[in-house]
Amino acid sequence: MLEFFHVAIYQPVYNVLVFFYNTVPGHDFGVAIILTTLFIKTLFIPLSKKQIESQKKMQELQPKIKELQKKFKDNKEQQTKAMMELYRDNKANPFSGCLPLIIQLIVLIAIYRVIINISQAGFAIRAEDLYAFVNNPGTVNHLFLSFLDLTKPNYVLGFLSALAQYFQTKMMLQTSTPASTESASSEPDFASIMNKQMLYIGPGITFFIGVTFPAALALYWLFSTLFMIFQQSVIFKAKQE
């Protein structure tokens, strides 16, 4: 399994990054990371689009789901049946976004390993991981725009990554459902509580990673999140038209 991951996912990401580094004028590793991020996110547009649409639809159905849970709170079997009918009538599948998310997480792990391995190797490129048609630059320049050291944690990049993560999560959690349609209940809304927690936990974890690991990883995370914000904006705008 590890060998398959290395050959099928890790090495392609590794070679794309080195290819962009060789191609970019001035051989800027930071720019190569940004281009690699945009390239991979572009490839995964169909998958991430499906994931975003699935998450958005589930958000829109939350008020109706809460009503069913309240209506059939003493009859779990009837509650499950009613919810399945709700999903079917609205052509929603609570699990449809799982596979795209899993695939993207696997690629994220590969990118993480590539950046960390290159950083820990003193930014020396491993010839054995390169394809024959990709030139080995030897040791890459670890300065982004000639001044930002990508080998060290950076608080500014960490903060910007966390801020972008906050707005991306907030955008996803926003719903057009009017407040009046929400069922009044004294019972705790666990879905709402979880959403509020994720709104702050996600950015908190992102900031921690940004100030703990090499700045190269925070740079990737920042532009990956910015891409997702742009993609979500386009999808949500198309849904409203």
Image (cartoon, rainbow, N blue to C red):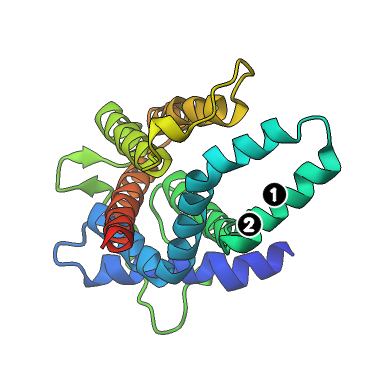
| Residue in view at x 69 percent, y 57 percent | 85
Task: Name the element at disc 2.
Answer: helix
Q: Which residue is mark 1?
A: 83
Q: Is residue 151 visible?
A: no
Tags 2 and 1 touching, CB below 8 Å: yes
* In front of the other: 39 or 237: 237
Figure quadrant of residue 49: bottom left
- The percent coordinates of residue 169 (x first, y second) are 40, 39
Q: Residue at x 31, y 44 (%)?
A: 222
Answer above or below: position of 172 versus 88. above
| Residue projecting furthest to the bottom | 133
Residue lying at 28% horizontally and 54% vertically, measured from the top left: 233
Q: Is residue 120 above or below residue 53?
A: above
Report how far apart the C-alphas of labels 2 and 1 lie in the structure. 6 Å
Q: Is residue 203 left or right of residue 80?
A: left
**Horizontal side of residue 237 vs 62, given as left or right:** left
Residue under pointer 2: 87
Residue 238 visible in the current orientation:
yes
Q: Position of residue 104 (x, y in %)?
A: 52, 59
The image's mark for residue 70 is none
Image quarter of the N terminus: bottom right
Please rate how many residues cluster around mark 1, counting C-alpha atoms within 10 Å: few if below 14, some from 14 to 19, many from 20: some
Residue at the image point whose x is 60% and y is 62% from the top: 89
| In front of the other: 111 or 183 | 183
Q: Position of residue 50 (x, y in %)?
A: 48, 64
Q: Quadrant of the C terminus?
A: bottom left
Say which element carries label 1: helix
